[in-house]
Amino acid sequence: LNDWFDRLAPTGEKIQLLSEPEELEDILLKAGHPYGLTVNRLQGAKIVGAIIGGSFGLLYFLLGLPMAPLMLIGGLFGGYMLPIWLVRRWAKRRQERIRREIPDFLDIMSITLQAGMSLDAALAHYVQTFSGPLSEEFARMNREIRFGVQRESAYRALMQRTTSPELEALLQSLIQAHNLGTPVSDIFMQQAEEIRRMRAEKAKEAAGKAAPKISLVSGLVIGPSIMLLLLGAFAMKYFIGENSVFRNMGF
């Protein structure tokens, strides 16, 4: 597929409907460039998707099925947007995994730093020990630093590749500690405690928002169910019980 994407990339670059290169580069960064996708290949992928979706729409149109013109247009547009939508979905899921991995990362870093390891050694230990998108991002950051990129620039590049406010706050603190020469071991401990506090507050907030929903469900489901049970019991007693209408009529 990448060969077809590369061939049709020049055509896709001429059609930038809902696919600005800067926006595509941003979502690819946050998705981790899955399957070797680049901006040019994604430009070609949307043309391939439009061809495939348009083919299905055209077949639907030739068969004379209902709403054929709408399906033809929908197939073209849907196929065109499908690769971009998939990359956005991958980016969202990857960023969610990064957010979930941050508390464990902070705990590991806090323990290793307190044990006497340097920051670079602790990061290398985490990258070698754990797998996942957060480990991949720190592995890339370590490579950039080894290749001569300034530490602050590597931190800021990592912030651009992620959307986690917790990770951004940590990196900002590391930049400040690097500039001022302060120890970083306390930073990870403080950030871990702060994240746990924020998550506890979010859990309380979610619980508070759930109470009205529970009341609504109770009112719409449980209340009518109880009324139906009462009406059913009354109907059974009226039509089937010992003093029912049918028994008094001799049935």
Image: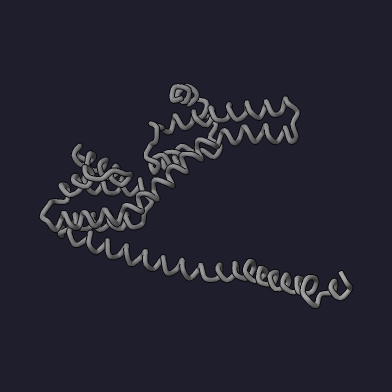
Where the C terminus falls, by quadrant?
bottom right
Left or right: 125 as drawn, with respect to 244: left
Name above or below for residue 123 compared with residue 199: above
* Position in image of residue 226 (x %, y %): 66, 71
Residue positioned most to the left: 116
* Position in image of residue 110 (x %, y %): 20, 57
* Position in image of residue 157 (x %, y %): 31, 45
Left or right: 74 as drawn, with respect to 168: right
At x 84% / y 73%, what residue is drawn?
247
At x 55% / y 70%, what residue is drawn?
212
Residue positioned most to the front: 250
Left or right: 33 as drawn, with respect to 61: left
At x 31% / y 58%, what residue is drawn?
169
Name above or below for residue 37 compared with residue 223: above
Q: Please give the count of numbered marks on the rendered protein.
A: 0
Colour scheme of this structure image?
A: one colour
At x 28% / y 43%, what residue is drawn?
131
Name above or below for residue 8 compared with residue 168: above
- Which one is nearer the viewer's eye here, 207 or 156? 207
- Which one is nearer the viewer's eye here, 31 or 226? 226
Determine the image quadrant of residue 190: bottom left
Residue positioned most to the bottom: 243
* Position in image of residue 85 (x %, y %): 51, 40
Left or right: 217 as drawn, with respect to 4: right
